[in-house]
Amino acid sequence: MGLMALHWGSLEGSNPLDDFHPRFEVPFRDLLAEEHVHLKVPYQGSGVDKNGAWTVKFTP
């Protein structure tokens, strides 16, 4: 299957992230057991109200 394209999504819309290549450490045993793995990654934007968390879902 290979790498899947990343997409950003929100209530306002979505967009592909062609040049965004993050690296995450994921429990490999969980993926081998075909379990879904979800990570929450906090972020801080340029404005005061631009804080939140990304949810990253790994599906084996």
Image: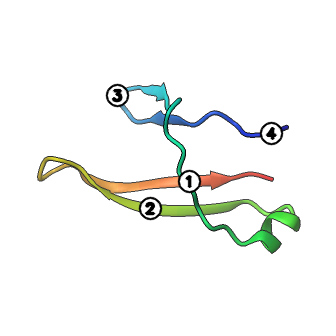
Which residue bears the numbered disc 1?
A: 56
Residue 17: image location, x then y, percent: 50, 32
Label 3 residue SS: loop
The kind of residue on which mark 3 rests is Glu
The kind of residue on which mark 4 rests is Gly
- Mark 2 or mark 3: whose residue is earlier in sequence: 3
Q: Is residue 29 above or below residue 23?
A: below
Label 2 residue SS: strand
Residue 15: image location, x then y, percent: 46, 26
The kind of residue on which mark 2 rests is Val
Between circles 1 and 4, the one closer to the viewer is 4
Asked if the residues shown at circle 1 and circle 2 are in contact, with their CB atoms under 8 angstroms apart, the answer is yes
Between circles 4 and 2, the one closer to the viewer is 4
Q: Which mark is residue 2?
A: 4
**Label 4: few (<14), some (14–19) or many (≥20) C-alpha neighbours in 10 Å:** few
Q: Is residue 54 above or below residue 24?
A: above
Q: CA distance from mark 1 to mark 2?
A: 8 Å
Which of 35 and 46 lies nearest the eye of the viewer?
46
**Label 2: few (<14), some (14–19) or many (≥20) C-alpha neighbours in 10 Å:** few
Between circles 2 and 3, the one closer to the viewer is 2
- Mark 1 or mark 4: whose residue is earlier in sequence: 4
